[in-house]
């Protein structure tokens, strides 16, 4: 597989297969040059979410779909009741485990609920919490429980500098060009941009492969 530098984006990258492009249940065309994740975002859950999830499941089986998500819990911006959000999220967790594809999580003000679901379902494989803006302590707490964080443009510099190299994951999300983020991160780390790119690509690959290896936790 070619190097992936952007673990989560809603835009197609200039160079195919360098970013994991987010698909929704309404996506009907997978351009074969690209690689993807697919999920039902908590903002987009509708009354017929079982039908939406059936579509997610079909798309998720495609070999170019490398991850499940983004999916998760949002107490702030989603109008959907929390019990429905949880039910939909559990379906994504099951898909991730069944298809051996890691999960990209969207979580706003619901970390306790997220961890509870992880425990209740007995999940050992790592997940990634995308667009993490919190501090280093919470990032470490999450990491200890198998949830990595990926940083976007609004990252907390202390979190970046505190993070062990092997966990550094970056994403452009809806903010366009990921190279802008690499520039900022390299400056903050006082590191060579090319070596940061290689590091993140290696970490993303390891994360994607993590579901194929036995968990010893
Ligand atoms: Zn997103």
Image (cartoon, grey):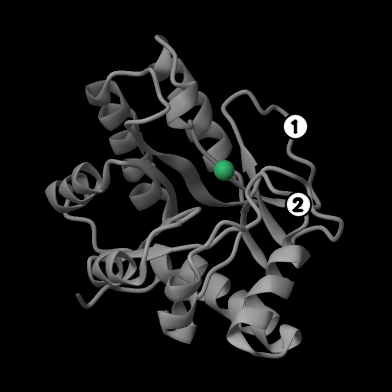
**Few, some or many C-alpha atoms within 10 Å of disc 2 (few <14, some 14-19, many ≥20)?**
some
Say what secondary structure mark 1 lies in: loop
User: For residue 174, which quarter of the picture?
Assistant: top right
Check the image and name the residue furthest to the left.
120
Q: Residue at x 29, y 72 (%)?
A: 140
Q: Quadrant of ligand 1?
A: top right
Check the image and name the residue furthest to the top.
47
Comparing 25 with 155, the one in front is: 155
Residue named by callout 2: 34
Q: Quadrant of the C terminus?
A: bottom left
Position of residue 167 measured from the top left corner of the image (x, y, whole percent): 45, 77
Comparing 189 with 151, the one in front is: 189
Q: Residue at x 28, y 19 (%)?
A: 81
Q: Which mark is residue 148?
A: none
Q: Is residue 182 above or below residue 42?
A: below
Residue named by callout 1: 29
Whether ligand 1 has any atom under 8 Å from the Cβ at mark 1 is answered as no
Whether ligand 1 has any atom under 8 Å from the Cβ at mark 2 is answered as no
Position of residue 144 measured from the top left corner of the image (x, y, whole percent): 24, 72
Position of residue 1 measured from the top left corner of the image (x, y, whole percent): 69, 70
**Few, some or many C-alpha atoms within 10 Å of disc 1 (few <14, some 14-19, many ≥20)?**
few
């Amino acid at each position: 597989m070619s190097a992936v530098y952007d673990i989560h984006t809603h835009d197609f990258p200039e160079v195919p297969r360098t970013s994991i492009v987010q698909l929704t249940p309404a996506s009907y065309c997978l351009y074969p040059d690209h690689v993807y994740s697919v999920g039902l975002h908590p903002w987009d859950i509708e009354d017929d979410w079982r039908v939406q999830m059936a579509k997610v499941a079909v798309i998720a089986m495609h070999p170019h779909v490398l991850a499940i998500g983004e999916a998760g819990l949002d107490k702030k911006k989603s109008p959907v009741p929390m019990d429905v959000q949880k039910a939909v999220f559990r379906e994504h967790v099951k898909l991730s485990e069944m298809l051996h594809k890691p999960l990209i999580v969207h979580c706003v003000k619901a970390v306790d609920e997220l961890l509870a679901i992880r425990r209740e379902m007995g999940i050992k494989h790592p997940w990634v919490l995308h667009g993490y803006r919190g501090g280093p302590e919470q990032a470490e707490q999450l990491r200890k429980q198998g949830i990595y964080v990926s940083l976007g443009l609004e990252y907390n510099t202390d979190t970046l500098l505190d993070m062990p190299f092997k966990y550094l994951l970056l994403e452009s999300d809806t903010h366009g060009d990921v190279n802008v983020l690499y520039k900022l991160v390299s400056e903050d780390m006082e590191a060579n941009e090319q070596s940061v790119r290689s590091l993140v690509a290696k970490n993303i690959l390891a994360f994607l492969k993590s579901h194929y290896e036995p968990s010893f936790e």
